[in-house]
Structure formats: C-alpha cells, structure tokens
Image (tube, rainbow, N blue to C red):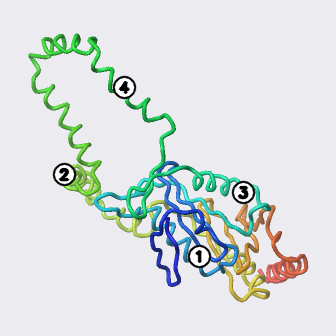
Amino acid sequence: MFQVLEGGVSEPIKWSKDHLTPESNIIILDEGSSSVFLWYGAKQGLVSRRTALRQAESLKGHGFSVGKSIVGRDIKDLKEVDQRKIGRVPENDELNDELQTLLNRSFKHLDDYTVTFDLDGEFPSAIKPASKPVSTEAPIPEPVIKSINRPEPVAIKTQPAPVKEIMKRASEYDTEPDLPKMTAPIRNQTIVDTPTSTLEHGTTPKPKLNLSIQAKIGFVMIGVLDHYDDIWISKKENGSYSVEHMDGKVCEFSIYEGKIKFSSDSFSGISTKVKTEIQKKFVELSKLL
C-alpha cells in the first residue's frame, strides 16, 4: 500500500483500510488478482489525481522492490476507485466493493509494508499433486523409459537443459541466460534498417488524422476552455478522447467516419447551460471548415 504525496512521490505505508480517506490518494498492489487499485479521495483535485495515476501506472509496469524480490511485476490491471462517485456510478461501485473485500480479508505481515493472505483451501490442494510421485506407480515406468532410451542418452540429457534455463530466467535478477537467445532475433532484425524508425514512433503504425478531424477535436477543446481554465485531455486505448476538469469529467468522444461522436454520459456531470454553450461553440467553429 502506498500514499501519493505532493510532487509525485509515493511512499509505502502500513497495510490498513483506515488510510482510505477523502484527503488521500492511495495505491494498493494486489498480486492475488494481478491488479493495482488506485483510490482517489473525494477532496483531491485534478492535479493530484493525475499525479497519483502516473505513479500507479509506473508501479503497474515495474512493480516494487522488497529485498531481493519484486512485488507486482506481473500486474495487468489498473482499477481506479473515485470516492466521489461511490453510490452514483455502478462500475465505480463494483470496483470499490472489490477493493473493500480485499481490505477486509485477514492477513499476515511479511515485513513492515508487505502482507499475505490465506489461500482459502487452495494450498492443501496444491500439496496433493506432490504426493502422486510417492505412489508405487511412478517408479514402474521409469526403468522402462531408461531401457528404451539407452541408445539416445544425448536426447535425454538435452531435454532437462531448457527447463533449467527457464528456471533461471524466472529469477528476477538472472538476465544472462536471456542474452544468448535474444541476440539471434536482434541480429536478424538489424539487417533491415527500416524497422528501427518505426519502433521509434511506436510499434503499431497509427493512421494519421486529417486536418479536418484535428480541427474538430480542437473546436471541442476551445468550447470547453471557454468555461474551465484547467482541463485534462487524455486519449484512451480504444482511441476515444476524455476531457476532464477539476471536479470531474466534462465529456468523452471518439472519431467515427470523420465525425465527432460523444459518449452517452458526456456532459452528464456539468450543467445543461454549459453543455449547450459548448455544443453551440463547436457548431459555429465547424462552419469555418
């Protein structure tokens, strides 16, 4: 569990649900669900929220070092819980319920900041497979396999070798076994010079928006800035754009067949008058095209 401080610094804190207050932004790394939970306190402004989001995304991508281990290196999901939206937005409520269930579970301290949960009966079942090799059936096929594979001792010895390499690669710090395997693909790629430039601009080529679409996106921003001095604009993974101000979301829209398409909940958090004026400004500017 981390508390996000001013200036973009996050510090680990002792595990307790009491830290989730209106005055705080809290990050929780949960390896059990491969998730990072980000709690936005109700009294936190837009700047502090975006700072906390950047910190959560960094932890999601790199994890956190605890001794010789890295906690959260395999995290896949970032789940944002906004205290202001509890009881009003169903999706936010579902994530909050999931977070509260996690915080209410019994736990044990591994160190000052890391805790572990009981496996709820999963651990005994994991032990059962280990008892199977002890049975009398396991030794029976072994002499048969050895007698058949005597002419091929090399094949038998070379098969375990990749397994050992895989185990080494699973270590968080043994990077040397990876180097011989990576050098061959890298050399094959460096024969062609053109992929280097494409990687610098992104591994997946994205179609450029024409000037008309870019202008329409700008018209939306101008209309919003007529009413809010501080806004945050972000582009989602699905290609849509989200515009927010200090107290929440203004609108969200996507580009479809050369037109601006607003989502169903756009402008739901602002007054109808401001919504109408933003749309009117957008229409007026669009006539210039």
- Which residue does the numbered mark 4 point to in the structure image? 129
Question: Nearest the camera: 203 or 49?
Answer: 49
Q: What residue type is labelled 3?
A: Asp
CB atoms at circles 1 and 4 under 8 Å apart? no
Label placed on residue 50: 1
CB atoms at circles 2 and 3 under 8 Å apart? no
Q: Is mark 1 on a helix, strand or loop?
A: helix
Label placed on residue 243: none
- Which residue does the numbered mark 2 point to in the structure image? 180
Graded by Cα atoms within 10 Å as few (under 14), some (14 to 19) or many (20 or more), the crowding at tag 4 reads few
Kindly report which numbered mark, 2 or 3, lies closer to the viewer in this rendering. 3
Expressed as whole percent of the image width and height from the top left, the position of residue 30 reads 50, 55
Q: Kindly identify the residue that appears in the image at 71 percent across and 79 percent down.
A: 245
Quarter-of-image position of residue 46: bottom right
- Of the 4 image quadrants, the one containing the C terminus is bottom right
Question: Nearest the camera: 112 or 48?
Answer: 112
Kindly report which numbered mark, 3 or 1, lies closer to the viewer in this rendering. 3
Question: Nearest the camera: 242 or 121?
Answer: 121
Number of numbered discs on residues: 4
- Which residue does the numbered mark 3 point to in the structure image? 93
Q: What residue type is labelled 1?
A: Arg
Q: What element carries label 4?
A: helix
